[in-house]
Image (spheres, rainbow, N blue to C red):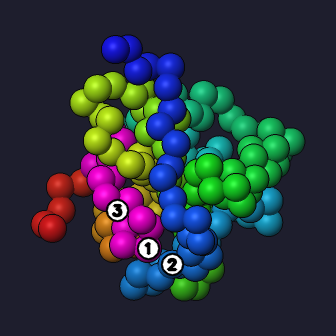
Amino acid sequence: MNYQNYIKKFDLPKDFKAPTKLEYEDLIAKPLTRDDLKEDLNAVNSSMEIIRETRGGSWPEEELSEDFNLLDLAWHEREFRDSESFAYVVYTSENVYVGCFYIYPMGARTTLTENLLQFDADISWWVSASAHEKGYYEKLYSAIKGWESEFPFTEIYYSNADIPMLEE
């Protein structure tokens, strides 16, 4: 069967509420909202090459406008509210913008194939160019691995193009 046009919906408990704050060392993640517009826009536009290189895919294809990013953040808010996907923004404990991570149903970001049917969720992330220089790409990966238990997923697929090789 050809699954490439399918998105595998999350199978979440009826009473599941996604966490609104996650902490790991000096990293703090919270749902991505329109309140993060300026920091997010600056980080994406100044980091397009490193985002495409590490996260994979073609996004961002070009510099984002404020209007476009505002609509995108509102879309992420709605999907989070409706538990269709979960987008988090990550700051340091000193309120320095680091980047974002996303939890999507399989098929939403990565084309669904028979080999990927076993996975419940697809997680990807990116950090700004300055955060990448400071080692936050690897650190955020470690944080996400630590936050896995906050979600009711059995099998998680990490779809970044450049997943750091860390000791588990």
Residue 63 counted in the magenta span: no
Is disc 3 surrounded by few (<14), some (14 to 19) or many (20+) residues within 10 Å? many
Percent position of residue 72, x then y: 74, 44
Q: Can you identify the residue that label 2 sits on?
A: 22
Percent position of residue 105, x then y: 49, 44
Mark linked to residue 150? 1
Marks 3 and 1, Cα distance to the nearest angstrom? 15 Å
Amino acid at the residue labelled 2: Leu
Marks 2 and 1, Cα distance to the nearest angstrom? 9 Å
In the image, taking residue 145 as reference, residue 11 lies left or right, namely: right
Q: Where does the magenta region start and end?
A: 148-163
Is disc 1 surrounded by few (<14), some (14 to 19) or many (20+) residues within 10 Å? few
Name the foreground residue: 17 vs 111. 17
Q: Residue at x 54, y 85 (%)?
A: 93
- Label 1 residue SS: helix
Amino acid at the residue labelled 1: Glu
Q: Main secondary structure of the magenta part?
A: loop
Above/below status of 37 relative to 52: below
* Any part of residue 43 in sight: no
Mark linked to residue 141? 3
Q: Which of disc 2 and disc 3 is earlier in sequence?
A: 2
Q: Nearer the viewer, mark 2 or mark 1?
A: 1
Split into 4 quadrants, where in the image is the N terminus? top left
Q: Residue at x 80, y 39 (%)?
A: 68
Residue reaching furthest front? 14
